[in-house]
Image: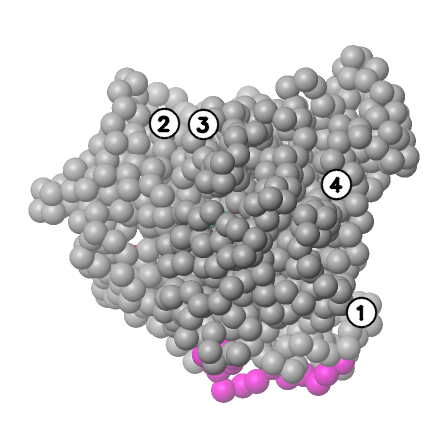
Amino acid sequence: MSGELSSSTPDSTPGSPPSAGAASGPVPPPVPGRRERAVDVLVVGAGPAGLALSSRLAASGISVEVVDREDEPGGVPRHCLHSGFGLRDLRRPLTGPAYARHWADTAVRAGAVLRTGVTVTGWGDGPPADPPAVDVTSPAGLERITARSVVLATGARERPRGARLVPGTRPAGVFTTGELQRTVHLHHRPVGRRAVVVGAESVSYSAVRTLRDAGVEVVAMVTELPYHQASPATALDARLRHGVPLLVGARVSELVGRGRVSGVALRQLDGRATTVACDTVVFTGDWIPDHELARRGGITLDRASRGPSVDGSFRTDRAGVFAVGNLLHAVEPASTAAREGLLAAEPVLRRLAGGPCPSAWIPVQVEEPLLWVAPSRLDPADPRVATGGFVLRTEGRLGPWSSLVVRRDGRVLHRQRLVRGAVPGRTVRLSAAWTAKVRAGMTAAVRDPDGGPVRISVER
Amino acid sequence: MTVTMSGPLPDEVYDVVVVGAGVVGTAIARELARYPLRTALVEASGDVGDGTSKANTAILHTGFDAVPGSLEARLVREGRDRLAAYAEECGIPVEPIGALLVAWDEEQLAALPALARKAARNGYRRTRTVAADELRGREPHLGSGASGALEVPGESIICPWTTTLAYATQAVRSGVDLHLNCPVTGVSESSARSPRLLTTGRGTLRARWLVNAAGLYADEFDRLLGHTDFSVTPRRGQLIVFDKLARALVSHILLPVPTALGKGVLVSPTVYGNVMLGPTAEDLDDKRATGSTAEGLAFLREKGRRIVPELLDEEVTAVYAGLRAATEHDDYAIRSHPEQRYVTVGGIRSTGLTASMAIAAHVVELLTEAGAKVGTARDLLPVTMPNLGEAYPRPYQRADLIGADPEYGAIVCHCERVSRGEIRDALAADIPPSSPEGLRRRTRALGGRCQGFYCGAAVRALLDASGADAWSSSRTEAAR
Ligand SMILES: Cc1cc2nc3c(=O)[nH]c(=O)nc-3n(C[C@H](O)[C@H](O)[C@H](O)COP(=O)(O)OP(=O)(O)OC[C@H]3O[C@@H](n4cnc5c(N)ncnc54)[C@H](O)[C@@H]3O)c2cc1C
Ligand SMILES: Cc1cc2nc3c(=O)[nH]c(=O)nc-3n(C[C@H](O)[C@H](O)[C@H](O)COP(=O)(O)OP(=O)(O)OC[C@H]3O[C@@H](n4cnc5c(N)ncnc54)[C@H](O)[C@@H]3O)c2cc1C
């Protein structure tokens, strides 16, 4: 199934110039067979972030179109069958698919045009244009859509085996959690009998649950770290109630098997080697934002998170282009993505109302063992952070009572205790209460827009 | 048209049986299809091009660096021209991007003129020396220390999968029988009067003439007929394929200056829009050792970091390895045994893709010289292959195609932008895939950066719904 889910069809006539509501600008010459259209806001990706944003924008009377390349809207939660979604933001437990439906319905009811089976394949040719234009492909043909604002909400995925440079043969039976969940929950297809799960973070335990649903025995979970990185309850449940052995401090050194995988060779940190027999391997976590469109659009990425670098208002460094959701921070829970979508509406509306576009930003950077921070820049004229905080990741464990310290040009702007410490793979939060201190017009020491970056470090 | 996957083999006497459906065997079968002969192509695997032919560096060589005067030098030179023309006729993706042999020190720089002279002895006269600053202008992402280069403008990149499939498709459409899942395990004596009997995993085949195109196993097959004049040492080449977002870093095929130890590690764009780093060269004794190793990958990354440092910051899409059929001889081992009505095509080591059409023509010459009555050649009906290359419009970019059939606008594999229409076409083709890998080689589906995170389950469902596994000889009769 593909096409428009909402009752309204996109208004367009083949080859007609952008209709009312579009910002002015040169109209590219029509390509034979390609429809030229214009909307106020185009949202790319109908996951929780894109749908939540679309619902809020549509409710403000803006013409918003949200497109997704999949045949069904909802993004990743569509194939997470377990409950627990919605608790934080909707205050009721929902399964992933129900959560996805909630946001799709909310967006359509608010008046957003939701189209599925529609892939954004690239940007209108030539140098980055303002207003931006994107090219799309769908069974209905090719379109070039010019929008006063484009919002990227393309999500994130797990690195597959090849990207992790795991040596060995290339047998069948090797999955990521995403592929596993789709295989089991969307296509109801067999997986295997004995699985090894690589990783021990929250999503790894989702993989264990999916394998169990599919009748696959999990013979081991393997993590390179000396401890799991999920909630204690989840990990305990898997180990005690379901008897899933957790091998810590071990790395997958090779995949073995011809045709079908027959085992994984493991190397312990102390050098010992073992091979675990299995017919299925699931590589979990090791996230990478789906940043192709962002990069192809000339948008600066944050080198560390590999998502687009945005400011507290979700603005990228390309005029009119915003980014929300897991594209910015791979990965946070669905509720975080949806909340960001809701909060991004106001900055997008400001842009549509002709709000200024910053010409310079203050970079926000992290020091070891911190890995990345999002957002990773601040607008000196308006350094608000819409979500009220930053999310970070650390590469090494941070003990209880260690502190995050925010400095600029050597001056401490903020200090925050991490009462419970932090582990790799899990969210670290930093309040944004201090950002007003970098606002232009404050004391000379911190005002200088030519001053250095803001740097976040750890004090143990 | 006859393509069989299982069941008994036809009870007829073939004029020629070609053993092995790699790029070489399929090219030979296609060449034989031009003659009024009954030809069978038999392959141990369930698909064509499932051996070394699927895992190489995919360069259409000029042969500039071949051993002058060797058979390989001649067949690579001729094969390149033939395949370049054939690719244009069939729509096999080729990009004539040219190569730069980059010198990284004074010694290598000093070796370039000799390489240009060697190229000239191989009949290639278009090489040109490129000074360091011009080199930097043309390849701004090269690592520091590149002191100059020899330009070989005729080197191209090509799609190896489509090449093999085009040969096989054209052969089959022109009357060659293709028998898959059909390993040949034994060969009877032959005489002038009675045809030879071949024992296969699917029963017996009868052949008047026999061609051995068994790739890595050509020596073992040769032993069945009593020959021991070469043995194959598998020489493994591991390769790393980088994300399409790396494509802008490299414009040419970046070759190292060859040393006594081999051709060395190259960095090259692929016709699919990725960048490839490799291969290693490791002599092994296991002909099935197509796995990658931690050492091999570390070695390649170290080399790559020197050639294009920024490449190493890009995501890796895939890692694979192929085995070259190296022998103790510094040339192809193509031998005619007229008394046995048998031709061996062995030792087609690192240039077989390029040389394939010339090897095929050479083999038919050898058969004729040995006394085979091949008759008069005819022109074959051309085939048009689906385009897998980035340099030409893909279906998802074509309003005309989608307008005529919306399935070409329904993208299933998002990373590679493969539509349901293309997958449907591949599944219904004359030689359909029998596995997800086979489908990948025909459409690129599942070959992208997510390696199935998004579309793996959907693509496998399409493959299974097509009944590709159950697909068998029943098709033969219907199609005849
Ligand atoms: C395997 C897995 C398990 C998870 N489990 C949980 C869990 O149990 N609980 C929880 O709270 N969170 C979980 N998460 C995280 C949660 O799913 C995400 O936080 C949430 O889905 C992020 O929403 P998003 O809108 O940013 O991105 P996504 O949900 O990923 O949506 C992005 C959408 O963009 C579309 N898209 C991408 N590129 C294009 C393009 N070029 N053109 C058109 N459309 C495009 C995609 O098709 C996709 O639908 C999990 C994530 C994964 C990957
Ligand atoms: C790393 C690497 C890089 C390379 N780069 C290039 C390049 O850039 N350019 C280039 O031109 N060449 C290149 N080559 C070389 C090229 O790939 C080979 O020369 C070519 O693929 C050989 O084809 P083939 O048909 O002889 O062998 P194969 O493709 O191996 O085919 C032989 C077939 O015979 C079948 N078979 C074997 N025994 C039997 C039996 N008893 N019964 C039935 N079937 C049997 C096998 O299953 C196999 O399918 C490269 C090779 C490698 C390994």
Question: Tag 2: residue type?
Answer: Gly
Q: Is residue B161 above or below residue B91?
A: above
Amino acid on which disc 1 is placed: Pro
- Place of residue B215 in the rendered image (x, y in percent of width and height, measured from the top left): 54, 42
Query: Which numbered tag is attached to residue A28?
Result: 1
Mark found first going from the N terminus, 1 or 2: 1
| Alpha carbon separation for disc pair 2 and 3 | 43 Å
The secondary element bearing badge 1 is classed as: loop
Residue lying at the far front of the rendered structure: B193
User: Neighbour class for label 4 at 10 Å: few (<14), some, many (≥20)?
Assistant: many
Of A86 and B388, nearer the camera is B388
In the image: residue B423, left or right of residue B289: right
Give me the residue at 64% from left, 19% from top.
Answer: B261
Query: Same chain for marks 2 and 4?
Result: no
Q: Which tag is nearer the camera, tag 3 or tag 1?
A: 3
> Contact, CB < 8 Å: mark 2 with mark 3?
no
Amino acid type of disc 4? Val
Find out if the beta carbon at label 4 lies less than 8 Å from the nearest ligand 2 atom.
Answer: yes
Q: Secondary structure at mark 4?
A: helix
Residue range in magenta is: A1-15
Q: Which mark is residue B222?
A: none
Residue A78 in picture, x, y percent from top left: 35, 65
Mark linked to residue A396: 2
